[in-house]
Amino acid sequence: MNLNKTALMAALDSVKFPLTGAGLVTAGKVAKVTTCDGHVAVTLDVAGLAAAEATGLGQACEAAIADVAARAKAPLVGLVVESADGRTLVRRTGPPAAAAAATPVAATAASAAPAAAKPAASGGASASLQAAAPSLPGVKHVIAVGAGKGGVGKSTVSVNLAVGLALRGHAVGIVDGDIYGPSLPTMLGLESMQANLRGNMLQPFYVHGVKAMTIGKLVDPEKPLIWRGPMAHGAFKQLVDQTEWGELDYLIIDLPPGTGDVSLTMAQQLRLTGAVVVCTPQKVAQDDAIRALRMFQQLGIPVLGVVENMSTFIADDISPPREYDIFGRGGAQLMAQRVGVPFLGAVPITIKLRQNSDEGNPSANFHGQTPLAQALDALVVNLESQVALAQMTTGARRPELTIS
Ligand code: ADP
């Protein structure tokens, strides 16, 4: 049995807010609760509490959640309680074995954690290469966006995730890993801009609240790139390393399509928080996406989730708007369930999304309460949650590499 949100909310409401004595949920102090595969993340509004009181409240939440998990015989693999202003009040991480020593609840977790939450057993040498890959200084989370094949909307999703995360107040960068077919110059409207060097560092373009770098602004866009593998790998690494990103919460990498060696090498060059796989709903697209998923898993990269793009077509020139499931809505979602990875959400086909992409104006996708804006918002919120959960899982399974 797994912990569900209802049980967690009940547990949190049994904890009283010190200033009023009301249950935390009733008092509106629970800003966010997410749970997946035995990991729980809670965000509390602790305004008005002293630091020690806030920590005490976090610990009370930990006890209540551990209690509900024990009674439900549900695994509690990891727990983070944070304040809405970003302070960590409680963090229970560590390998399941270590957690097992701490509480009997975690012991259940160690044995019952589902396969999807475990490190890729089959990754072997490749997985350990990712574990040893260097982190990017100043960047909290590097997220690769991949797809089984081209044309499914991988760049579109990458750009909109970046802009959506920025709209939610994060410091975000995006880089074209699609060295042979960079889309960012068009999709972000960089065409009239010039790349700038300071010292030997490239200055990222700052557009739509996002810092961006793309090979497309450094080479002639009309000339085909005929680099062989190692040159492409070198170019990507240089692009990432020699861009002055500053402090970032998220760096999104728009990977090349497929499971080619560029993706493989990239995964070994940079420590990733996880990968997002974009897929359209059709069966043939799912098969390709599963190959991409397996590639990430074999490389030891957590799959943060699947995005179903072109899920449904919304014809909004008629009233009320009508939806057509051209490609078979829900196919990618079912695939995600079948292979045991999270589903982040579905993006409809809309003329606006295509137009805004062609015009380099992704911010416009988020305007108003349109189905597109709502779908993109939901995607971004789910990604944030999965990153929080992956952080706990990753913390539990990646050893620190010490070279002496
Ligand atoms: P990929 O990176 O997978 O090759 P792109 O993101 O470049 O795919 O998308 C291919 C084309 O499809 C682009 O013209 C893009 O604007 C369009 N497109 C992608 N997703 C959608 C969508 N949901 N609705 C409308 N057009 C879309």
Image (cartoon, rainbow, N blue to C red):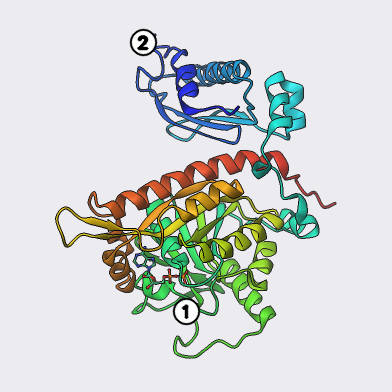
Residue sitting at 16 percent across and 53 percent down? Answer: 320
Decide: is 113 above or below 302: above
How many numbered circles does the render carry? Answer: 2
Picture quadrant of residue 364: bottom left
Can residue 168 be seen in this snapshot? no
Where residue 312 sits in the image (x, y, percent)? 35, 58
Decide: is 183 above or below 245: below
Specify the amino acid type for callout 2.
Answer: Thr
Q: Can you tell which mark lies on residue 216?
A: 1
> Circle 1 — which element?
helix
* Nearer-the-camera pick, 137 or 147: 147
Specify the amino acid type for callout 1.
Answer: Gly
* Nearer-the-camera pick, 356 or 111: 111
- Residue that carries the numbered disc 2 in the rendered image: 20
Give the Cα distance between marks 1 and 2. 57 Å
64 lies left or right of 111: left
* Outermost left residue: 319
Q: Is mark 2 within 8 Å of ligand 1?
A: no
Dot 1 or dot 2, earlier in sequence: 2
* Nearer-the-camera pick, 220 or 193: 220
Crowding near pointer 1: few (<14 within 10 Å), some, many (20+)? many
Residue sitting at 26 percent across and 65 percent down? Answer: 352
Image quadrant of ligand 1 equals bottom left
* Outermost top residue: 21
> Circle 2 — which element?
loop
Decide: is 17 above or below 262: above
Where residue 338 sits in the image (x, y, percent)? 58, 48
Picture quadrant of residue 2: top right
**In which quadrant is the N terminus drawn?**
top right
Residue sitting at 61 percent across and 57 percent down? Answer: 293
Where residue 147 sits in the image (x, y, percent)? 54, 64
34 lies left or right of 348: right
